[in-house]
Image: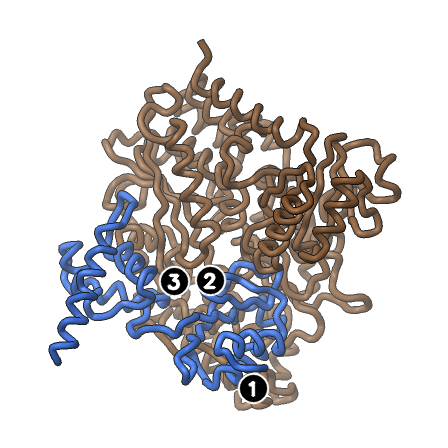
Amino acid sequence: MSTPFEELKTRALKRWDEFTSTEKAWIRIGGGTSGQASGADEVFNSFRSTVEKIGANANVSMVGAMGLMYMEPQVDVLMPDGVRVFYGNVHPDEAKEIVTQHVNDGKPLLDRAFAYSGGDGTTTGSLPSLDSLPTMSFQERIATRNFGETDPHDLLQYIARGGYEALNRALTEMTPEEIVEEVKASGLRGRGGAAFPAGVKWGFLAPSTAPIKYVLCNCEEGDPGAFNDKGIIENDPHTLIEGLIINGYATKSTHGYVFIRTGHNLPIEAARKAIQDAYDVGLLGKNILGSDFSFEMEVSLTGDSYVAGEETALMEAIEGKRATPRFKPPFPAAAGLWQKPTNINNVKTLAYVPEIVRNGSGWFKDIGTETTSGTAIVCLSGHITYPGMYEIPMGMTIRDVLEKIGGGVSEGERIKVLQAGGPLNGLLGEDAFDTMIDFDAMSEAGASIGSGGIIVGNESTNVVDLLRNLIAFNQFESCGKCFPCRLGNTHMLEILDRMCQNKAKPADLALIERVGISMKAGSLCGHGQLGFNPIASALKYFGDEIDACLAGELPAPGVFGDGTMILPTRTRP
Amino acid sequence: MTTADTKQSSALRVEIQRILSAQKQPTITILSSLLAVQDSIHYLPDEAIKETARFTGETTNEVWSVASFYTNFRFTPPGEKTLDVCWGPSCHLLGAQNILESVHSALEITEESESPDGKVTLKYNTCLGACAQGPCIAIDHRVFGKQTPETANKIAKDLRGLKS
């Protein structure tokens, strides 16, 4: 008799064959929030109706975004001969041409395509292979392995590509203790920003014999410039769900929550459907895959609050209260959600877990650097030629990521400033571009991988104006619990406003530093403790520009010519 | 309060009670309840605060403390459509301030509020999650990227039914 998992796998492989091993072509359109923003829905609808109208022999699917966001809306066609051709920046009106010529006549539009995969290249002319593109060749895709390949709403497609094998292996061959040891041995460090070893953290919760224990997945991701957590959930939700179930098994927990901010509808819908589908086939609920392990999971939504991403504030939000941080100790492993033992991990951390369990800790440990194993999922945006989401091995330098993958800024220009790791982390100038992407090296340079967002500014960027934008964000998002953070951010924003309006005095520099020191000393969570980081790093890398601004030598930024900025007026009472 | 007001208020109460009881997820809290109400009727009237308090067994004071904390909650009916414009650092570098200014002019307002005809609510958003396509705006949570002051102005005017 076959096991429940073997039965699922058989169904899954049959389903995958329906898409890939038939006489039918498979047209895949990259979705996700970024795809949507570029018009992918219209492109998808156009392809679907074109295929119906002219009776072409093709399946059409909206799949996860591949990450090459500069190419969106992105469409690819897999023909029955196994050759797949990729088209970028596709307009809905092009559907007819692509379907008739490529699908029906078997002639890909080679001068319109940007890459191919599969086959020996004899039918695709001078097109480069997908793997040879710099935006792909430097990547090492683990957490993002299914991006662009599978329909995120189809559980069977995930299973067909090796999904839930790790969970099955964990439940049938490994004890919870062995999994904790495996995660420890892999060197996986938390991807939420603090970089704490994940296995060690899991080990804090595992020994507790409490009848109810929680594992939480943090996808608050309010950091502007970061979209990889939401990206994983909307493009391949099951990799997270599987990781969270394994997290639950390893720590002998009973309940899991996926915590997402309201309004981000694509990741919310994807997570909800994935959880429901997992329940429907026995991957969640009582006696998972016929084992002794039972585990419940649900999506928990938060309202708009950046601080809700702080782990203790997150627990307050799940409990339905104001998302303000708690005093520690007690730590979550002792008394967390509803005072029960709790473990919290970031989406990316959990997304690696299935592949670590499937391939072994040694495999993961070999990727990346000595102190930071694995990959970083970087989100490039701002003034960069090839914006997108790229999973790179730890240890690449920032410069390589920007130039080799990102294609630098426009011809003849240079990159002036980076904002990496979210608005509580620093700005980086060119002196820091040779820093390796690795938790320790980045932190020495005064920045952080943090959220994985890297916002790129070209030479036109006014550093003081960018700083004001970051501090305005931090001020707007302060939860208000600790007054040094609540008032300090407001005070710093006032000073930066004066600087932008050429009304600042040199003494303001000492003042802003004093405010920063007070915030660091007097705040309960990172929001206040790290709030001075952007300014400290700007002083380090762009001190001359700040001096020039204080001396009134720089033109006032902004749209009104007087240095003022349009900002929300609402504050938290 | 007139009789008509009372009637309207009691119809609203019934509707809110229906929304609160229809929550599907196992964990029901003040926050989940308020999110459910706002999701359905797009704002939190006084009745929502009182009914949520009753439904969750908490005080109205506690419900207000949650409602006033999260910046997505609003307490007056919004316009027919909500237009979010991102002002986060990534979109900022790509010209978000110019887009805000242009949308202000299309909506004839100077801050987060409703256009005078009540058709559009403008919100400033810290990040819409599609930074690679910036600058971004969203209409009722649907994101549109690569905006210019001109395209955003046209979208805002179209939402008001005005010719650009």
Q: Chain of mark 2?
A: B
**Same chain, marks 3 and 2?**
no
Please give left or right for residue A90 compared with residue A557 in the image.
Answer: right
Image point (38%, 60%), residue name: A307
The colour applied to the residues of chain B in this rendering is blue
Mark 3 neighbour class, 10 Å CA radius: few under 14, some 14 to 19, many 20 or more: many
Horizontal and vertical percent for residue A473?
Answer: 47, 70
Return the mark for residue B141. Answer: 2
Horizontal and vertical percent for residue B44?
Answer: 27, 67
Mark toward the viewer: 2 or 1:
2
**Same chain, marks 2 and 1?**
no
Give the residue type at disc 2.
His
Sequence order check: which comes first, mark 3 or mark 1?
3
The residue to which callout 1 is attached is: A563
**Contact (Cβ within 8 Å) of mark 3 with mark 2:** no
Q: Nearer the viewer, residue B108 or A426?
A: B108
Horizontal and vertical percent for residue A540?
Answer: 61, 68
Mark toward the viewer: 3 or 1:
3
Give the residue type at disc 1.
Gly
The colour applied to the residues of chain A in this rendering is brown
Please give left or right for residue A498 compared with residue A388 in the image.
Answer: left
